[in-house]
Amino acid sequence: MPLNIALIGAGAMGGAIGRRLLATGQNLTIFDLDPEKVADLVKLGASAAASAAEAAAPCDYVITSLNAPHIVEIAIFGAGGVAEGAKKGTLIIDMSSIDPEATKAMGNKAAEKGLRWVDSPLSGGAPKALSGELTLMAGGTAQDVEDAHNVLQHLASNYTHMGPVGAGQTTKLINQVLCGLNFMAVAEATQLALDAGVDAAKVPVALKGGRADSAILQEYMPRFATKDYRRTGRIDNMVKDLNGAQDLARRTHTSMPLTALCAEVHRMLTAAGLGGEDQAALMEYFTGPDRTQFD
């Protein structure tokens, strides 16, 4: 039986989540401030709402996919927000990648209003969302995380309960540290291969199954080598996540020198105007921006 789901935020990631849920036959109501993004999903069978409150009203589940904790806060608790329209017991599933402490505070605030909260940030990006193969790390009570799986099973092939509210976001920061460092390592290795006259496109094949292998190596070294800059993510989003990891490291007194360097490189590229580009644009760190790549 189809689920009644509200989706708040239909950007690159939210849009992919919405398309996947519609493809699996769910009833989807959309709210986003960009009418074009809403229209794209309405064409596929979604219903449009005039506010987050209106979107939440008929639904048992509300998914948020937004860029920052203050935006999530407004979408849920602001004027016309989810909390105004949602019925008691509605399960909010926040798939944004935001600060764990802000998440805990919002989870507590939701509970005071009779709403349930699961933070379930993702790894895999829009391509994996569209194929239902995301990796999700969830924070919340055991019952709420189990209930959220009714929805998230359509989006994910790997779903893990990491602990109470906020634990999913903490795990996502750890994921982003590993991804950010891996992106940088693969970009450097690609440039070394190119400078040394080795066919970089063959390196992932040669190393497949070895200790240096990774999903990022397999997907991104060929893209790095050819400067394939089609957008499946954003450098400035990685800056946000690495900033969050460094904030967490300061709170836990954890030394993370490689993460600091990785964050600085991403900040530098963002300052150079490449923040909206895919991680493949890390190659510009080695060669300098060729603006024709972004036309």
Image (cartoon, rainbow, N blue to C red):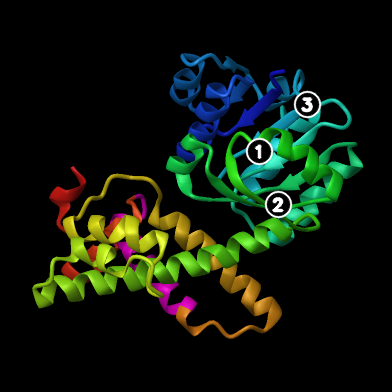
Residue 224: x, y in percent?
Answer: 24, 60
Q: How many marks?
A: 3
Give residue 86's position: percent from left, percent from top: 80, 26
User: Mark 2: few, some, or many residues within 10 Å (few <14, many ≥20)?
Assistant: many
For mark 1, does the 10 Å Cα neighbourhood hold few (<14), some (14 to 19), or many (20 or more) residues? many
Q: Report how far apart the C-alphas of labels 1 and 3 lie in the structure.
A: 13 Å
Say whether disc 1 or disc 2 marks the residue closer to the N-terminus.
2
Which kind of residue does numbered mark 1 sit on?
Answer: Leu
Q: Are marks 1 and 2 in contact (CB under 8 Å)?
A: yes
Which residues lie in the magenta part? 259-276
Q: Quadrant of residue 146?
A: top right
Q: Residue type at mark 2: give it.
A: Ala
Marks 3/2: CA distance? 18 Å
Residue 11 position within the rendered picture, expressed as x and y whole percent measured from the top left: 48, 36
On screen, 50 above or below 158? above
Identify the residue shown where x is 43% and y is 22%: 36
Q: Would you place residue 196 above or below residue 267 in this image?
A: below
Pick the front one: 59 or 200 = 200
Determine which residue is flagged by label 3.
60
Q: Which residue is mark 1?
A: 152
Q: Kindly give the residue lying farthest to the left in the view shown.
A: 197
| Residue 160 on the magenta span | no
Name the quadrant of the C terminus.
top left
Q: Tell me what residue is drawn at x 24 percent, y 64 percent.
A: 283
Give the residue at x 33% y 45%. Answer: 231
Q: What residue is disc 2 on?
A: 138
